[in-house]
Image (tube, grey):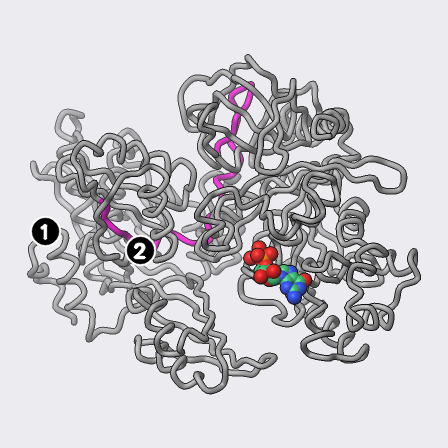
Amino acid sequence: RRKKIVEQCERLMDNPEQIRNIAIAAHVDHGKTTLTDNLLAGAGMISDETAGQQLAMDTEEDEQERGITIDAANVSMTHEYEGDDHLVNLIDTPGHVDFGGDVTRAMRAVDGALVVVDAVEGAMPQTETVVRQALREGVKPALFINKVDRLISELQEGPEEMQQRLLDVIEDVNELIRGMTEDMDDIDDWTVSVEDGTVAFGSALYKWGVSMPSMQATGIDFGDIIDLERADKRQELHERTPLSDVVLDMVAEHFPDPFDAQPRRIPTIWRGDADSDLAHDMRDVDPDGEVVLMVTDIGIDPHAGEIAAGRVFSGTIEKGQDLYVSGTAGTNRVQSVGIYMGGEREEVEKVPAGNIAAVTGLKDAIAGSTVSSVEMTPFESIEHISEPVITKSVEAQNMDDLPKLIETLQQVAKEDPTIRIEINEDTGEHLISGQGELHLEVITQRIERNQGIPVNTGEPIVVYREAPTTESREVEGRSPNNHNRFYITVEPLSEEIVDLIQLGDVSMDMPEQERREALQEAGMDKDTSQNIETIHKTNIFVDDTKGIQHLNETMELVNEGLTEALDDGPLAAEPVQGALIRLHDARLHEDAIHRGPAQVIPAVRQAVHNALIDAEIRLLEPIQDVRIDVPTEHMGAASGEIQGRRGRVDDMYQEGDLMVVEGIAPVDEMIGFSSDIRSATEGRASWNTENAGFRVLSDNLQPEIINEIRERKGMKTELPEAINYF
Ligand code: GDP
């Protein structure tokens, strides 16, 4: 049977009209895994009885244990709709907010996102995040409202109440969609509605579902559903209106095929020359064009080694091809190509444009790489909604494990680009940085359990930022030989501009004219926007000088000095954020020998640091949105847990039988939150956090935290004298 399905998939791969590349996006626990099992069972890939228990997508051991999905896995299935077979390639996205980067990557490879919302809980913060990620990548949404059985059997709702609740969920989701797509001129009305058939609802647990078309086809209405559920005749509901058919029909009917999607999406996700042959190959989904694969995920197979999975945008991938990997020199040879069926990979002859492929042999590829048969502009660097905000040291308990540990850490960084690794071979104490405490915990557990390397880990350490708060005076930086001088000022960038840079809406990769317009729209004056020399993380370097001899040939060194100054800020050697650095004037020695790296780099570095200090630089700390769901009697304890952590409670309201407490708190104070909230609420609270950027640390805490960091980093603990404004 499996072999037959693979053969069927292989035939369908050549017909883009019959392909749908989709992701399921949901808040944790809303039923993504259960729904996926339904779809697999409906497609005959797992037995109907085991659907819901098998958790076919959660292949990693720790995922099954924790009951949350961590790695994006991929699966293909077939579905007959209106007489035609369809190939549905489903990419799994992680549900926990700590894994935001994986979600974005998965979205880039698909054209449709099935948004799953629990009918009882409604849209949650993570629903908002995933819908936003989908829309930003030009991925079309459809909605499945799950756990409707609970409205009937637990909440005893009648038809009107039920209908109202479903409409509320739909409206919440539509509000998000409208807000995000209003300004996108390449997207029509993408709001979802029951009438259009872009909304379905049902029960993944009891395997039934309905949509407007299915109700019309089967004659089943709300009253029937309520009667059958109440009478415990769910099996009958499943037989009359199986969830997998309803959802897969919706997928086939409403999600774009690659022919529809690629012409619209390529300009948003690829910044290369729109008139080039390559652009045509991709827009046309041309199987005979150049090979272009965007890697979304790297998996490890104990036998085959690394497997790069991703979307083939043009050409046809086959064994033996030598393909370029973005960001590396030279090519890798394809060892095998395959598709995913459940948790397993099936080798096939070739995978043409429009499909999701699993490729071995691409040893230099990482998640996010562009792999192609010609050298090309890579896909826009994949946006990460959150930068790492927390760091932990790991060290092997046995020195013999050291090489294996280093190898594993490098592997982890390859699989998950939101993780940063710093290897320190001298001390053996390596650093991993990630999105939150849980994120790092999962990684260390994998090292210990999957690799069998016992490790010691340090206390989690928060990553801070340094940012100017006012405009500096002009500062002179002199080279050690006194022959070169740089005149620099620093001022804060507006929050709006910092956001644009972080979202990738302003970058050095985009056409210059577009960048100027975006910045001017955000309030930057024309001259400044035209004089931008580089963008370094969230900082902008502007060259206001004119006609200075030798400056062009020295610019590379100026940039190096700038990078050093910004990577390690003057307060505590944390990264600088949101600074506009302006070069007003420079004196350079005639002779290149006297303006080498040893002269220029320290001069620029010093000037930037002094200007930052004059601009009253402050430490910023990362903060998180916190949401806690608790029974009423524990509400006080829950809000106390936020307030006691230098946090702020913004809202408290009833939802179903629970109270919801929403607020915000610094990441530093959130360490240890999970065990504290458990004991404060007798384990009755469920909660989640989401990174919410950085905010200025209050002045009375600045000296103390700065000193702590300096001490930890082995820097001099007394601050430079100029920093006396605390
Ligand atoms: P995920 O975290 O989104 O993958 O959610 P799961 O599929 O693991 O489901 C979370 C929990 O909700 C599990 O205990 C499921 O059995 C339960 N669940 C899923 N779908 C339904 C449903 O339609 N009705 C009810 N009553 N429970 C459901």
Magenta span includes 383: yes
Whole-percent x, y for residue 71 in the image: 49, 44
Q: Is residue 565 above or below residue 331?
A: below
Q: Is residue 237 above or below residue 151?
A: above
**Marking on residue 191:** none
Question: Ligand 1 is located in which of the four quadrants?
Answer: bottom right
Bin the neighbour count of mark 2 within 10 Å (Cα to Cα): few under 14, some 14-19, many 20 and up.
many
State the residue at coordinates (43%, 65%). 689
Range of magenta residues? 369-394
State the residue at coordinates (38%, 56%). 438
State the residue at coordinates (69%, 38%). 45
What residue is disc 1 on? 714
- 77, 689: nearer the viewer: 77
- 447, 337: nearer the viewer: 447
Q: Is residue 59 above or below residue 196?
A: above
Name the residue type under label 1: Gly
What residue is disc 2 on? 390
> Considering only order in the chain, which callout, 1 or 2, is on the residue closer to the N terminus?
2
Secondary structure found at label 1 = loop
State the residue at coordinates (40%, 77%). 682
Whole-percent x, y for residue 320 in the image: 55, 12
Name the residue type under label 2: Ile
- Residue 30 seen from this side: no
Whole-percent x, y for residue 623 in the image: 36, 66
